[in-house]
Amino acid sequence: MAENAKRAFVIGHPIAHSRSPKIHGHWLKSYGLAGSYEAIDVAPGDLAGFIAALRENGFRGGNVTIPHKEAVFELVDRIDPAAERIGAVNTLWFEDGRLWGGNTDAHGFAANLDEHAPGWAANGPAVVLGAGGAARAIIYALKERGVRDIRILNRTLERAGDLRDRFGEGISAHRLEAAGELLADAGLLVNTTALGMHGNEGLPADPAALPDKAIVTDIVYVPLETPLLAAARARGLACVDGLGMLLHQAVPGFERWFGKRPAVTAELRDLVLADLGVAA
Ligand code: NAP
Protein backbone atom coordinates (compact mmCIF):
# COMPACT_ATOMS: atom_id res chain seq x y z
CA MET A 1 0.00 0.00 0.00
CA ALA A 2 1.20 3.54 -0.76
CA GLU A 3 2.88 5.27 2.15
CA ASN A 4 0.26 8.00 2.34
CA ALA A 5 -2.65 5.52 2.10
CA LYS A 6 -5.51 6.48 4.39
CA ARG A 7 -6.39 4.05 7.18
CA ALA A 8 -9.74 3.47 8.86
CA PHE A 9 -11.08 0.73 11.14
CA VAL A 10 -14.02 -0.82 12.89
CA ILE A 11 -13.38 -1.70 16.52
CA GLY A 12 -15.49 -3.97 18.69
CA HIS A 13 -15.19 -7.01 20.92
CA PRO A 14 -15.83 -9.42 19.28
CA ILE A 15 -15.57 -7.99 15.77
CA ALA A 16 -15.52 -10.93 13.33
CA HIS A 17 -19.27 -10.60 12.58
CA SER A 18 -18.99 -6.99 11.31
CA ARG A 19 -20.05 -6.39 7.68
CA SER A 20 -18.41 -2.97 7.62
CA PRO A 21 -15.11 -4.19 6.08
CA LYS A 22 -17.10 -5.63 3.14
CA ILE A 23 -18.90 -2.32 2.58
CA HIS A 24 -15.89 0.00 2.87
CA GLY A 25 -13.60 -2.47 1.08
CA HIS A 26 -16.01 -2.50 -1.85
CA TRP A 27 -16.06 1.29 -2.03
CA LEU A 28 -12.25 1.60 -1.78
CA LYS A 29 -11.89 -0.87 -4.64
CA SER A 30 -14.63 0.55 -6.85
CA TYR A 31 -13.33 4.14 -6.53
CA GLY A 32 -9.69 3.02 -6.91
CA LEU A 33 -8.65 4.74 -3.66
CA ALA A 34 -5.42 3.98 -1.85
CA GLY A 35 -6.61 3.16 1.63
CA SER A 36 -7.54 0.41 4.05
CA TYR A 37 -10.42 -0.42 6.36
CA GLU A 38 -9.54 -2.96 9.03
CA ALA A 39 -11.61 -4.88 11.58
CA ILE A 40 -9.75 -4.72 14.88
CA ASP A 41 -10.72 -6.57 18.04
CA VAL A 42 -10.19 -4.16 20.91
CA ALA A 43 -10.97 -5.43 24.41
CA PRO A 44 -12.61 -2.89 26.77
CA GLY A 45 -9.41 -2.52 28.79
CA ASP A 46 -7.46 -1.57 25.65
CA LEU A 47 -9.91 1.01 24.28
CA ALA A 48 -8.37 4.15 25.80
CA GLY A 49 -4.88 3.18 24.58
CA PHE A 50 -6.16 2.41 21.09
CA ILE A 51 -7.92 5.76 20.79
CA ALA A 52 -4.95 7.68 22.19
CA ALA A 53 -2.68 6.13 19.52
CA LEU A 54 -4.96 6.74 16.50
CA ARG A 55 -2.92 9.57 15.06
CA GLU A 56 0.49 7.99 15.48
CA ASN A 57 -0.88 4.84 13.80
CA GLY A 58 -2.00 6.87 10.81
CA PHE A 59 -5.75 6.37 11.24
CA ARG A 60 -8.18 8.92 9.79
CA GLY A 61 -10.93 7.48 11.99
CA GLY A 62 -13.26 4.53 11.99
CA ASN A 63 -16.37 2.83 13.26
CA VAL A 64 -17.13 1.81 16.80
CA THR A 65 -19.41 -1.06 17.71
CA ILE A 66 -20.47 -3.10 20.73
CA PRO A 67 -19.30 -2.84 23.52
CA HIS A 68 -17.55 0.53 22.95
CA LYS A 69 -20.36 2.81 21.70
CA GLU A 70 -20.81 4.54 25.08
CA ALA A 71 -17.27 4.24 26.48
CA VAL A 72 -15.77 6.33 23.65
CA PHE A 73 -17.71 9.40 24.81
CA GLU A 74 -15.01 9.97 27.40
CA LEU A 75 -12.20 9.55 24.88
CA VAL A 76 -13.11 12.00 22.09
CA ASP A 77 -12.76 15.80 21.97
CA ARG A 78 -16.15 16.58 20.41
CA ILE A 79 -19.52 14.83 20.09
CA ASP A 80 -21.91 15.55 17.22
CA PRO A 81 -25.58 16.35 18.03
CA ALA A 82 -26.85 12.96 16.83
CA ALA A 83 -24.49 10.97 19.05
CA GLU A 84 -25.27 13.29 21.96
CA ARG A 85 -29.03 12.76 21.69
CA ILE A 86 -28.84 9.07 20.83
CA GLY A 87 -26.30 8.37 23.57
CA ALA A 88 -24.02 6.25 21.38
CA VAL A 89 -21.05 6.91 19.08
CA ASN A 90 -20.57 4.73 15.99
CA THR A 91 -18.17 6.87 13.91
CA LEU A 92 -14.88 8.64 14.74
CA TRP A 93 -13.00 11.16 12.60
CA PHE A 94 -10.50 14.00 12.88
CA GLU A 95 -11.64 17.52 12.06
CA ASP A 96 -9.79 20.76 12.76
CA GLY A 97 -7.23 18.80 14.74
CA ARG A 98 -9.80 17.31 17.09
CA LEU A 99 -11.20 13.81 17.40
CA TRP A 100 -14.96 13.76 16.84
CA GLY A 101 -17.50 11.09 17.79
CA GLY A 102 -20.71 10.94 15.81
CA ASN A 103 -23.65 8.68 15.14
CA THR A 104 -24.73 7.84 11.58
CA ASP A 105 -27.51 5.31 12.31
CA ALA A 106 -30.25 7.96 12.14
CA HIS A 107 -28.87 9.13 8.80
CA GLY A 108 -28.84 5.52 7.57
CA PHE A 109 -32.43 4.96 8.60
CA ALA A 110 -33.73 8.17 6.98
CA ALA A 111 -31.66 7.75 3.79
CA ASN A 112 -32.98 4.20 3.33
CA LEU A 113 -36.57 5.45 3.52
CA ASP A 114 -35.76 8.45 1.30
CA GLU A 115 -34.52 6.01 -1.32
CA HIS A 116 -37.34 3.47 -1.14
CA ALA A 117 -40.36 5.39 0.20
CA PRO A 118 -39.94 9.10 -0.63
CA GLY A 119 -42.32 11.33 1.30
CA TRP A 120 -42.33 8.94 4.25
CA ALA A 121 -41.82 11.66 6.86
CA ALA A 122 -45.05 13.45 5.90
CA ASN A 123 -47.21 10.31 5.90
CA GLY A 124 -48.72 10.66 9.38
CA PRO A 125 -48.01 9.34 12.88
CA ALA A 126 -45.11 6.90 13.32
CA VAL A 127 -45.26 3.76 15.44
CA VAL A 128 -41.90 2.48 16.65
CA LEU A 129 -41.80 -1.08 17.99
CA GLY A 130 -38.97 -1.49 20.51
CA ALA A 131 -37.10 0.79 22.87
CA GLY A 132 -33.50 -0.44 22.71
CA GLY A 133 -30.38 1.18 21.29
CA ALA A 134 -31.55 1.15 17.67
CA ALA A 135 -34.90 2.73 18.60
CA ARG A 136 -33.05 5.77 19.97
CA ALA A 137 -31.42 6.44 16.59
CA ILE A 138 -34.73 5.99 14.82
CA ILE A 139 -36.63 8.32 17.11
CA TYR A 140 -33.89 10.91 16.64
CA ALA A 141 -34.26 10.56 12.85
CA LEU A 142 -38.05 10.83 13.03
CA LYS A 143 -37.83 14.00 15.13
CA GLU A 144 -35.17 15.51 12.88
CA ARG A 145 -37.38 14.87 9.87
CA GLY A 146 -40.37 16.57 11.51
CA VAL A 147 -42.59 13.63 12.48
CA ARG A 148 -44.73 15.14 15.22
CA ASP A 149 -46.58 12.10 16.60
CA ILE A 150 -44.27 9.23 17.55
CA ARG A 151 -45.68 6.25 19.44
CA ILE A 152 -43.16 3.94 21.07
CA LEU A 153 -44.43 0.44 21.84
CA ASN A 154 -42.30 -1.93 23.86
CA ARG A 155 -42.63 -5.22 25.71
CA THR A 156 -41.15 -3.47 28.76
CA LEU A 157 -43.20 -0.30 29.16
CA GLU A 158 -40.63 1.36 31.41
CA ARG A 159 -38.00 1.41 28.64
CA ALA A 160 -40.48 3.04 26.24
CA GLY A 161 -41.14 5.62 28.98
CA ASP A 162 -37.42 6.30 29.31
CA LEU A 163 -37.22 7.12 25.59
CA ARG A 164 -40.27 9.34 25.77
CA ASP A 165 -38.59 11.27 28.60
CA ARG A 166 -35.32 11.43 26.67
CA PHE A 167 -36.82 12.78 23.44
CA GLY A 168 -39.71 14.80 24.85
CA GLU A 169 -42.50 16.48 22.95
CA GLY A 170 -44.62 14.51 20.51
CA ILE A 171 -43.68 11.11 21.91
CA SER A 172 -45.91 8.65 23.74
CA ALA A 173 -45.05 5.30 25.36
CA HIS A 174 -47.19 2.15 25.28
CA ARG A 175 -47.11 -1.60 25.69
CA LEU A 176 -46.81 -3.76 22.57
CA GLU A 177 -50.32 -5.08 23.26
CA ALA A 178 -51.77 -1.59 22.54
CA ALA A 179 -50.70 -1.84 18.89
CA GLY A 180 -54.19 -2.40 17.41
CA GLU A 181 -55.66 1.02 18.11
CA LEU A 182 -52.38 2.92 17.72
CA LEU A 183 -51.83 1.52 14.23
CA ALA A 184 -55.26 2.51 12.87
CA ASP A 185 -54.18 6.01 11.71
CA ALA A 186 -50.41 5.48 11.45
CA GLY A 187 -48.40 6.43 8.36
CA LEU A 188 -45.22 4.58 9.28
CA LEU A 189 -44.54 1.41 11.23
CA VAL A 190 -40.94 0.65 12.21
CA ASN A 191 -39.81 -2.57 13.85
CA THR A 192 -36.67 -2.19 15.95
CA THR A 193 -37.29 -5.19 18.20
CA ALA A 194 -35.26 -8.34 17.78
CA LEU A 195 -38.52 -10.17 16.97
CA GLY A 196 -38.41 -11.50 13.43
CA MET A 197 -34.70 -12.26 13.41
CA HIS A 198 -33.60 -15.79 12.57
CA GLY A 199 -34.02 -17.78 15.78
CA ASN A 200 -36.51 -15.27 17.19
CA GLU A 201 -39.37 -15.70 14.73
CA GLY A 202 -42.53 -13.80 15.54
CA LEU A 203 -44.64 -10.83 14.63
CA PRO A 204 -44.09 -7.78 16.86
CA ALA A 205 -47.41 -6.25 15.66
CA ASP A 206 -50.05 -7.14 13.08
CA PRO A 207 -49.93 -4.79 10.06
CA ALA A 208 -53.54 -5.73 9.25
CA ALA A 209 -54.55 -2.87 11.57
CA LEU A 210 -52.71 -0.23 9.47
CA PRO A 211 -54.41 2.06 6.94
CA ASP A 212 -53.74 1.48 3.22
CA LYS A 213 -51.35 4.43 2.95
CA ALA A 214 -48.98 3.12 5.63
CA ILE A 215 -45.30 2.34 5.01
CA VAL A 216 -43.74 -0.54 6.94
CA THR A 217 -40.02 -0.92 7.58
CA ASP A 218 -38.08 -3.45 9.62
CA ILE A 219 -34.51 -2.73 10.65
CA VAL A 220 -33.87 -6.45 11.16
CA TYR A 221 -32.27 -7.68 7.91
CA VAL A 222 -31.61 -11.36 8.63
CA PRO A 223 -33.87 -12.59 7.15
CA LEU A 224 -34.33 -9.77 4.65
CA GLU A 225 -38.05 -10.44 4.38
CA THR A 226 -39.04 -10.61 8.05
CA PRO A 227 -42.42 -12.01 9.12
CA LEU A 228 -43.57 -8.39 9.63
CA LEU A 229 -42.60 -7.34 6.10
CA ALA A 230 -44.16 -10.49 4.64
CA ALA A 231 -47.44 -9.77 6.44
CA ALA A 232 -47.38 -6.10 5.39
CA ARG A 233 -46.66 -7.03 1.78
CA ALA A 234 -49.53 -9.53 1.81
CA ARG A 235 -51.72 -6.69 3.11
CA GLY A 236 -50.63 -4.59 0.08
CA LEU A 237 -48.58 -2.01 2.02
CA ALA A 238 -45.35 -0.31 0.92
CA CYS A 239 -42.41 -2.12 2.52
CA VAL A 240 -38.75 -1.21 3.05
CA ASP A 241 -36.24 -3.78 4.33
CA GLY A 242 -33.47 -3.00 6.81
CA LEU A 243 -30.37 -3.68 4.74
CA GLY A 244 -30.38 -0.19 3.25
CA MET A 245 -30.05 1.33 6.74
CA LEU A 246 -26.85 -0.66 7.30
CA LEU A 247 -25.45 0.43 3.93
CA HIS A 248 -26.44 4.10 4.17
CA GLN A 249 -25.10 4.52 7.73
CA ALA A 250 -21.65 3.77 6.32
CA VAL A 251 -21.71 6.66 3.82
CA PRO A 252 -20.78 9.66 6.05
CA GLY A 253 -17.82 7.86 7.64
CA PHE A 254 -16.34 6.78 4.31
CA GLU A 255 -16.62 10.32 2.99
CA ARG A 256 -14.85 11.74 6.06
CA TRP A 257 -11.96 9.29 6.00
CA PHE A 258 -11.41 8.86 2.27
CA GLY A 259 -12.73 12.13 0.80
CA LYS A 260 -15.30 10.63 -1.56
CA ARG A 261 -19.04 10.38 -0.96
CA PRO A 262 -19.82 6.78 -1.90
CA ALA A 263 -23.00 5.48 -3.53
CA VAL A 264 -25.22 2.73 -2.18
CA THR A 265 -25.70 0.56 -5.26
CA ALA A 266 -27.45 -2.69 -6.14
CA GLU A 267 -23.98 -4.22 -6.56
CA LEU A 268 -23.03 -3.35 -2.97
CA ARG A 269 -26.35 -4.65 -1.69
CA ASP A 270 -25.87 -7.99 -3.50
CA LEU A 271 -22.33 -8.28 -2.16
CA VAL A 272 -23.45 -7.81 1.44
CA LEU A 273 -26.43 -10.11 0.98
CA ALA A 274 -24.16 -12.84 -0.34
CA ASP A 275 -21.82 -12.29 2.62
CA LEU A 276 -24.74 -12.59 5.03
CA GLY A 277 -25.95 -15.72 3.24
CA VAL A 278 -29.36 -14.08 2.92
CA ALA A 279 -31.65 -14.58 -0.07
CA ALA A 280 -32.47 -11.36 -1.98
P1 NAP B 1 -31.54 -3.90 22.03
O1 NAP B 1 -31.01 -2.62 22.54
O2 NAP B 1 -31.11 -5.18 22.68
O3 NAP B 1 -33.16 -3.81 22.06
C1 NAP B 1 -33.93 -4.94 21.74
C2 NAP B 1 -35.40 -4.55 21.65
O4 NAP B 1 -36.13 -5.71 21.21
C3 NAP B 1 -36.02 -4.12 22.98
O5 NAP B 1 -37.01 -3.16 22.73
C4 NAP B 1 -36.63 -5.44 23.47
O6 NAP B 1 -37.73 -5.24 24.35
C5 NAP B 1 -37.15 -6.02 22.17
N1 NAP B 1 -37.32 -7.47 22.21
C6 NAP B 1 -36.34 -8.42 22.22
N2 NAP B 1 -36.90 -9.64 22.25
C7 NAP B 1 -38.25 -9.46 22.24
C8 NAP B 1 -39.36 -10.35 22.27
N3 NAP B 1 -39.19 -11.68 22.30
N4 NAP B 1 -40.61 -9.83 22.27
C9 NAP B 1 -40.80 -8.48 22.22
N5 NAP B 1 -39.78 -7.58 22.20
C10 NAP B 1 -38.52 -8.08 22.22
O7 NAP B 1 -31.19 -4.11 20.48
P2 NAP B 1 -30.95 -2.96 19.38
O8 NAP B 1 -29.52 -2.58 19.38
O9 NAP B 1 -31.97 -1.92 19.57
O10 NAP B 1 -31.20 -3.78 18.02
C11 NAP B 1 -32.49 -4.28 17.70
C12 NAP B 1 -32.47 -4.95 16.33
O11 NAP B 1 -32.16 -4.00 15.33
C13 NAP B 1 -31.40 -6.06 16.19
O12 NAP B 1 -32.01 -7.12 15.48
C14 NAP B 1 -30.33 -5.42 15.35
O13 NAP B 1 -29.63 -6.36 14.56
C15 NAP B 1 -31.14 -4.49 14.47
N6 NAP B 1 -30.36 -3.33 13.98
C16 NAP B 1 -30.33 -3.09 12.62
C17 NAP B 1 -29.63 -2.00 12.14
C18 NAP B 1 -29.57 -1.73 10.65
O14 NAP B 1 -28.67 -1.02 10.22
N7 NAP B 1 -30.50 -2.24 9.87
C19 NAP B 1 -28.98 -1.12 13.02
C20 NAP B 1 -29.04 -1.38 14.39
C21 NAP B 1 -29.75 -2.49 14.86
P3 NAP B 1 -37.50 -5.12 25.95
O15 NAP B 1 -37.08 -3.69 26.20
O16 NAP B 1 -38.82 -5.44 26.52
O17 NAP B 1 -36.43 -6.11 26.31
Image: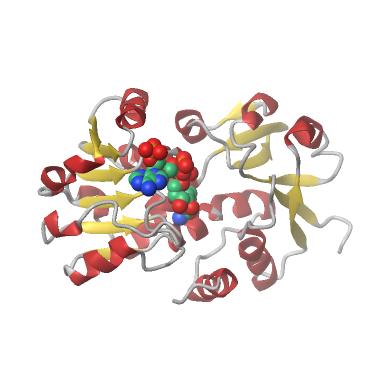
- Residue 200 is situated, as x and y percent measured from the top left of the image, at 42, 56
- Quarter-of-image position of residue 216: bottom left
Residue sticking out furthest to the right: 3
**117, 190: nearer the viewer:** 190
Please indicate, yes or no, whether residue 107 appears anywhere in the rendered image: no
Q: Residue at x 25, y 54 (%)?
A: 120
Q: Residue at x 66, y 24 (%)?
A: 74
Q: Is residue 129 left or right of residue 261?
A: left
Image quadrant where one finds the C terminus: bottom left
- Residue 276 is situated, as x and y percent measured from the top left of the image, at 56, 68
- Residue 65 is situated, as x and y percent measured from the top left of the image, at 62, 44
Q: Residue at x 11, y 56 (%)?
A: 211
Image quadrant where one finds the N terminus: bottom right
Q: Is 61 placed above or below 113 here? A: above
Q: Is 166 placed above or below 59 here? A: above
- Quarter-of-image position of residue 132: top left
**191, 175: nearer the viewer:** 175
**164, 13: nearer the viewer:** 13
**153, 94: nearer the viewer:** 153
Q: Is 234 placed above or below 96 here? A: below
